Amino acid sequence: MDRFLVKGAPKCPLGKGEKQEEAGAEAATLGEDGGSARKRPRREPPGSAGHSWRHIQAEGLDCDYTVLFGKAEADGIFRELEEEVEYFTGALARVQVFGKWHDVPRKQATYGDAGLTYAFSGLTLSPRPWIPVLERVRERVSGATGQTFNFVLVNRYKDGCDHIGEHRDDERELAPGSPIASVSFGACRDFCFRHKDSRGKARSRDVAVVRLELAHGSLLMMNHPTNTHWYHSLPVRRKILAPRVNLTFRRVVPTKK
């Protein structure tokens, strides 16, 4: 249940959660030397030429990062997303934790191919049909990576108070071993990976947190087996005042009839 809420997260403008996060395990940050994660530039992208990629690797973590859209194009896509995406409302915008209902601290929507179902936050949903802007982004991601996707989860964060708690994208509907493509538009936010052995009071060892800055128009490929070993989150950052929209493209196995 802590997949969608930061347990004990502060209400803005308090910054206690941020201070606790920063005081945690030593972080290996994209673009800096040191830490347990290894980063190296790539001239060739995972699927085809044309982008400068950075590879992020640690024990059981395998990701690729690039800026896929230039600023002008990313600005245009962001405006279209703000105008066209229809987010969940009512009961679909709430989550039950320890018997109590809470508003999800962001807006969410799902789009995808007909006949798919996807379970998250205790709900099983059928996605809305693709809209043109999401199809264009999906085609660009597929062209850059050589991967195909049939579903997207859209998360909108109105400012740095909106967040998502530590979780793994390991739902049973996902095709085994398939990557997840995370495309970001709007405010730059830091994105944190924490190894499953380093979580909570019962952690068995200390593994450095891997922290990335996800820029406007960027693509982060989370490759297998990242979601087996690492949890990820978007922490509260009260100084961020601008919105961010994130698209996570996935490959979902169609439900058997």
Image: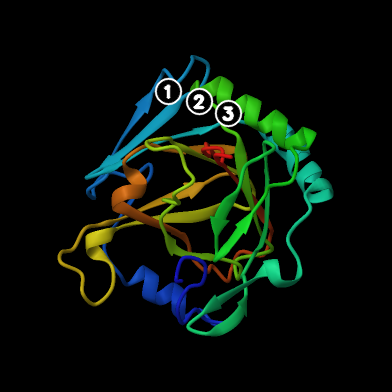
Q: Which residue is mark 3?
A: 141
Left-right relation of 15 to 130:
left
Q: Nearer the viewer, residue 197 or 17?
A: 197
Amino acid type at circle 1 is Pro
Q: Residue furthest top?
A: 49
Q: Are marks 2 and 1 in contact (CB under 8 Å)?
A: yes
Amino acid type at circle 2 is Gln
Instruction: Give the structural element (helix, strand or loop) at label 1.
Output: loop
Instruction: Give the structural element (helix, strand or loop) at label 3.
Output: helix
Task: Please report the residue visible at 62 percent of the width from the left and 70 percent of the height from the top.
Answer: 104
Disc number for residue 147: 2
Measured from the top left, where is residue 112 in percent x and y? 67, 40
Task: Please report the residue visible at 45 percent of the width from the left and 60 percent of the height from the top.
Answer: 233
Q: Quadrant of residue 44?
A: top left
Of discs 2 and 3, which sits in the foreground?
A: 2
Q: Quadrant of residue 193?
A: bottom left
Q: Which residue is mark 1?
A: 46
* Position of 167 relative to 226 (above/below): below
Left-right relation of 250 to 176:
right
Q: Nearer the viewer, residue 218 or 176?
A: 176
Q: Quadrant of residue 108?
A: bottom right
